[in-house]
Image: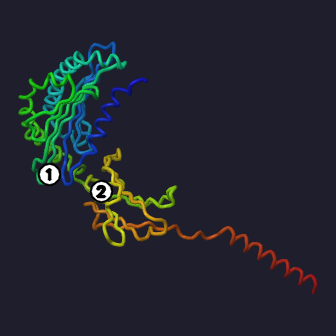
């Protein structure tokens, strides 16, 4: 079985990370992937930067100019010096990751070659989370090699958790790296995030109210799934709660993570399984900053169908009968 396309791994990494949001806050996250394909000596380095779910800049060493490029219109306000500095930092990081990839490959060649790998990947994600009032909330860093070996900066930003032979060999030399990453996450990353929020405030600080609906599906067992949908909203912070007879019904409620919709907005749903015939006892309550007030939704049974066609056919037939009788009476007279 052929492995998925290397660039798809970066998209998967981004998609998984962007589902993690903290209410009333903003994230700046950077995603790197170093790809070394079989038969190609020079690895490819890709970097993308996101604020919340909006990509604001990107770098690809395979590009014609291999420069950091703006990916959001509001980043055009940054001067040329900014892009020169960002390009230089991306090139330095790519050289560092290239060395790490070769170290990982050296320690893992035997295992991966046995699995028929036709490329090697080093994946890296790091970022900072800031509250709406500008306070630093948390930072994170994770390095993974081909999905087997990884090293994670712990929540205290001063120690590491490692899994796999290759990264454990690096751990001793990485103790000093924790201090460097803590400084970056708490200072440089925060400064860049606040700068992006200022430049892109019309996009990043906007509010878009959710489009809402309740769907109804009869299950094979005879009971019913009621699903409350919220679509196309921004920012990501939203609350969906089902109530039964006015009381919160959260014990058996299915509530997956908020997910990016792919257009800069988000989507979410909450579902409950209810006895058939009791659907109208349940209401869904939606809270979001884009709404002037919380919404209360319930499933509406479909209105009885008016048999328009049958009525029309009846009218036509009735008219024909009456007309025939009138003609007969006139003829007889």
Q: How many marks?
A: 2
Label 1 neighbourhood size at 10 Å, few (<14), some (14-19), many (20+)?
Answer: some
Label 2 neighbourhood size at 10 Å, few (<14), some (14-19), many (20+)?
Answer: some
> Considering only vertical position in the picture, is 160 above or below 114?
below
Residue 148 appears at what percent x and percent y?
27, 27
Q: Residue at x 36, y 65 (%)?
A: 284
| Extreme residue toward the right, this view | 332
The reply to whether residue 23 is visible in this rendering is yes
Displayed quadrant of residue 270? bottom left
The residue identified by callout 2 is 208
Displayed quadrant of residue 185? top left
User: Which mark is drawn over residue 131?
Assistant: 1
| Extreme residue toward the front, this view | 221
Q: Residue at x 59, y 69 (%)?
A: 305
Along the viewing direction, whichever of 81 and 266 lies nearer the viewer = 266
> Considering only vertical position in the picture, is 331 above or below 150?
below
Quadrant of the rendering where the C terminus is positioned: bottom right
Residue 124 appears at what percent x and percent y?
22, 31
Along the viewing direction, whichever of 92 and 219 lies nearer the viewer = 219
Along the viewing direction, whichever of 155 and 139 lies nearer the viewer = 155
User: Which mark is drawn over residue 147?
Assistant: none
The reply to whether residue 230 is visible in this rendering is no
Secondary-structure class at tag 2: loop
Residue 224 appears at what percent x and percent y?
47, 61
> Considering only vertical position in the picture, is 331 above or below 220?
below
Secondary-structure class at tag 1: strand
Q: Residue at x 77, y 73 (%)?
A: 317
Q: Are marks 2 and 1 in contact (CB under 8 Å)?
A: no
Residue 40 appears at what percent x and percent y?
31, 14
The structure's colour scheme is rainbow
How far apart marks 2 and 1 lie (CA) works out to 19 Å
């Amino acid at each position: 079985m052929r492995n998925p396309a290397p660039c798809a791994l970066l998209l998967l990494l981004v998609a998984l990370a962007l589902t993690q949001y903290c209410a009333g806050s903003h994230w700046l996250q950077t995603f790197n992937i170093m790809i070394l394909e079989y038969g190609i000596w020079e690895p490819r380095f890709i970097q993308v930067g996101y604020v919340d779910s909006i990509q604001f800049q990107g770098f690809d060493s395979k590009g014609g100019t291999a420069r950091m490029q703006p990916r959001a219109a509001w980043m055009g306000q940054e001067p040329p010096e900014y892009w020169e500095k960002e390009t230089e930092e991306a090139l330095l990081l790519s050289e560092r990751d290239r060395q790490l990839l070769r170290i990982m490959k050296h320690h893992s060649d035997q295992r991966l070659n046995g699995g028929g790998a036709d490329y090697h990947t080093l994946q890296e994600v790091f970022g900072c989370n800031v509250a709406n009032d500008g306070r630093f909330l948390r930072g994170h860093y994770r390095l993974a090699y081909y999905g087997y070996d990884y090293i994670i900066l712990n929540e205290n930003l001063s120690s590491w958790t490692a899994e796999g032979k290759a990264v454990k060999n690096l751990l001793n030399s990485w103790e000093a790296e924790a201090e460097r990453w803590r400084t970056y996450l708490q200072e440089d990353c925060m400064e860049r995030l606040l700068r992006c929020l200022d430049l892109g405030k019309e996009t990043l600080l906007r509010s878009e109210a959710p489009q809402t609906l309740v769907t109804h599906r009869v299950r094979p067992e005879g009971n019913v799934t009621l699903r409350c949908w919220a679509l196309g909203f921004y920012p990501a912070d939203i609350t969906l709660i089902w109530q039964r007879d006015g009381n919160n019904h959260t014990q058996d409620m299915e509530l997956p993570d908020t997910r990016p919709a792919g257009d800069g907005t988000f989507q979410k749903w909450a579902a409950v399984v209810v006895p058939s015939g009791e659907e109208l006892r349940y209401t869904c309550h939606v809270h979001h900053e884009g709404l002037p007030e919380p919404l209360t939704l319930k499933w509406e049974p479909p209105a009885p169908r008016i048999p328009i066609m049958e009525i029309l056919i009846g009218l036509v037939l009735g008219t024909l009968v009456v007309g025939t009788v009138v003609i007969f009476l006139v003829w007889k007279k």
